[in-house]
Image (cartoon, rainbow, N blue to C red):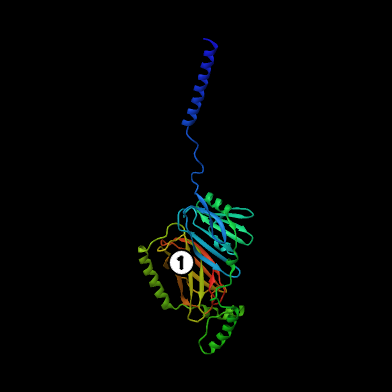
């Protein structure tokens, strides 16, 4: 065998070996794609800020609060990936009230905090005096979103208080009217805080507003509602108090109205809610458990069973599912007046 033949044979052998290596590599199992679970994101403009959101998601405003010292806007995802990314909130001075009580703080650095409870995450990003809160079940996607968030113009989140709030001057005038009305037996609710010396003498009479007959009626109503609850539509998963509105009329017979946003619930589903009102540390009501159906705007409305002689200064909310399981509690501090109050 001459040298030329040897060279040709060597080249052929190299080609065969190289081809075998390539064939082995092609037939070997590929490494799992670690980003296969990623949700595709695209840039979106929310006027107050820019952020990347899941493709084909649909964020609609479900709650907004505008006051001089605090404010917030909540967008709920009603499109695709609504579990991975449930909603986005931008707020000033309200984050402590918007992070659910059963959330556990996982990480905390100079600009972001991560909370978790039962597989649901809330990530908070702070820039100057403004916070962005993203809620959902996919921590990887939430982190990508919060990293992309850029605050733009948030001055409208602290716009003047709603017109229907009672100015301080009018509250003072009502104090005078209350004194005059007392003489004519047409008194209005007490605006001023009860003095310490008055508590011992008058608290019991002023707070006990529920008569025995009304208690019997309420018990009957509760029994009826429990019987009807089996035909109502239950919520799916965890539900929370996502903010709301309180309003108490100034007349002695005016009740307190609460409008509560049920986060995690859907229109047509029903929940059980209990609200206890307080004034100066004293209970104003028993707090009945009432079944309510979530309306199209995500809210439920509930009036107090009785009218109170005093404006409440605190409300304690307990939210249950239809099976009677406690889902969330929240305590709200109220101004003791007839203004419309947001939380």
- Residue at x 60%, y 66% (from the top left corner): 155
Tag 1 residue:
299
Q: Is residue 195 above or below residue 134?
A: below
Residue 215 location, quadrant: bottom left
Give the number of marks.
Answer: 1
Q: Position of residue 334 (x, y in %)?
A: 56, 72
Q: Nearer the viewer, residue 26 or 272?
A: 26
Q: Is residue 117 above or below residue 274?
A: above
Specify whether residue 235 is in view.
Answer: yes
Classify 10 Å Cα crowding around label 1: few (below 14), some (14-19), many (20 and above).
many
Q: Position of residue 323 (x, y in %)?
A: 41, 61
Q: Is residue 247 above or below residue 243?
A: below
Q: Nearer the viewer, residue 122 or 279?
A: 122
Residue 269 location, quadrant: bottom left
Residue that sits furthest to the front in the current view: 4
- Residue at x 53%, y 19% (from the top left corner): 11
Q: Nearer the viewer, residue 120 or 92?
A: 92
Residue that sits furthest to the bottom in the current view: 184
Q: Position of residue 51 (x, y in %)?
A: 55, 55
* Mark 1 element type: strand
Q: Is residue 214 left or right of residue 157?
A: left
Residue 213 location, quadrant: bottom left
Specify whether residue 105 is in view.
Answer: no
Quarter occupied by the C terminus: bottom right
Q: Is residue 178 left or right of residue 298?
A: right
Q: Position of residue 84 (x, y in %)?
A: 49, 52
Q: Nearer the viewer, residue 25 or 291?
A: 25
């Amino acid at each position: 065998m001459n040298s030329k033949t040897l060279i040709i044979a060597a080249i052929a052998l190299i080609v065969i070996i190289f081809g075998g290596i390539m064939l082995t590599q092609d037939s070997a199992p590929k490494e799992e794609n670690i980003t296969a679970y990623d949700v595709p994101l695209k840039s979106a403009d929310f006027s107050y800020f820019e952020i990347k959101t899941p493709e084909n998601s649909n964020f609609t405003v479900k709650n907004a609060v505008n006051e001089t010292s605090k404010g917030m806007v909540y967008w709920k995802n009603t499109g695709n990936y609504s579990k991975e990314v449930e909603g986005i909130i931008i707020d000033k001075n309200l984050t402590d009230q918007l992070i659910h009580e059963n959330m556990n703080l996982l990480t905390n650095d100079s600009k972001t905090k991560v909370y978790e409870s039962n597989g649901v995450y809330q990530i908070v990003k702070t820039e100057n005096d403004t916070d962005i809160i993203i809620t959902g079940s996919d921590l990887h996607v939430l982190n990508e979103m919060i990293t992309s968030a850029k605050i733009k113009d948030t001055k409208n989140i602290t716009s003047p208080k709603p017109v229907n709030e009672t100015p301080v001057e009018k509250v003072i005038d009502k104090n005078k009217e209350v004194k005059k009305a007392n003489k004519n037996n047409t008194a209005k609710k007490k605006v001023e805080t009860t003095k310490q010396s008055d508590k011992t003498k008058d608290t019991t009479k002023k707070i006990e507003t529920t008569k025995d007959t009304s208690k019997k009626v309420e018990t009957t109503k509760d029994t009826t509602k429990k019987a009807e609850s089996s035909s109502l539509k239950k919520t799916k998963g965890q539900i929370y108090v996502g903010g709301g509105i309180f309003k108490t009329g100034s007349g002695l017979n005016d009740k307190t109205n609460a409008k509560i946003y049920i986060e995690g619930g859907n229109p047509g589903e029903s929940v059980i809610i209990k609200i206890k009102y307080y004034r100066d540390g004293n209970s104003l009501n028993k707090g009945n458990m009432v079944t309510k159906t979530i309306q199209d705007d995500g809210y439920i409305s509930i009036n107090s069973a009785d009218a109170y002689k005093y404006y409440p200064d605190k409300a304690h909310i307990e939210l249950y599912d239809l099976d009677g399981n406690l889902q969330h509690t929240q305590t709200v501090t109220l101004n003791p007046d007839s203004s419309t109050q947001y939380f």
